[in-house]
Amino acid sequence: MPLPIENDKGRTEHWINGPVALSSSTIVHKPLGLLAELTHRCPLGCPYCSNPLAFDAREDELDTATWGRIFREAAGLGVLQVHLSGGEPGARRDLVDITAGAHTAGLYTNLITSAVGITAKTLGALTEAGLDHVQISIQDSNAASADHIAGYDGAFARKRALAAEVVRHKLPLTVNAVVHRANIDRIGNMVDLALGLGATRVEIAHVQY
């Protein structure tokens, strides 16, 4: 349930109803989105990745039940959507259960994935669990260059295959193209690739690290 707050008129309000005045000069707005970094594990080795150098071990990751509690508490604070990210969230064996927990909490669920580790069978199970949206990252429009940047042979082909499955399941697809000096001359080609994959939204992200 949303946290009750007593307003300046002595009436109890909930954060989910809108901004909450904690004092005459401070207003706290309800959060709308939650970025859930489910794991630091990832099969790719992109050199620009923002993951920490000291990775949390699998045994230190939050378990399924804890994520479920977090999603319920977030919804109570007014959060509307959750971005299931990493690392690569597909490295979590309980990803379907985590997604179901977010869906049960009433959150719009967005899977942010490299596509490596998410099989057609897994995507089907995620869809049944309530997944609402998928975002796939691409490293280049050229397969050889994309695999080289990702440090994973065959990654480009897997991204194309998963994108086709996302479209087949009629889920909205975002393609995130990470731009840097190794591919900046092919921005137009990457946008064309994204549209060809069936993306309804294209995100151009410049390297920040």
Image (cartoon, grey):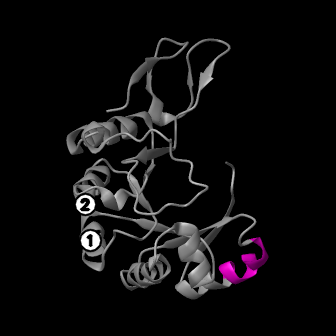
Amino acid type at mark 1: Thr
Left or right: 90 as drawn, with respect to 186? left
Percent position of residue 188, x then y: 74, 80
* Residues under numbered marks 2 and 1 in contact, where contact means CB atoms less than 8 Å apart: yes
Q: Secondary structure at mark 2?
A: helix
Q: Residues within 10 Å of mark 1 (few under 14, many from 20)?
A: some
Above or below for 117 versus 56: below
Q: Which residue position is annotated with label 2?
A: 96
Which is more N-terminal, label 1 or label 2? 2
Describe residue 121's horizontal placement relative to residue 51 as left or right: left
Give the residue pinned by disc 1.
122
Name the residue located 48 percent from the left edge and 35 percent from the top edge.
Answer: 17
Stretch of the chain drawn in magenta: 184-191
Q: Write the residue at 31% across / 50% down.
A: 102
The main secondary structure of the magenta stretch is helix
Q: Vertical placement of 197 versus 171: above or below? A: below
Nearest the camera: 13 or 94? 94
Q: Is residue 119 magenta?
A: no
190 is within the stretch colored magenta: yes
Res 200 seen here: no
- Give percent across and percent down for residue 131: 34, 64
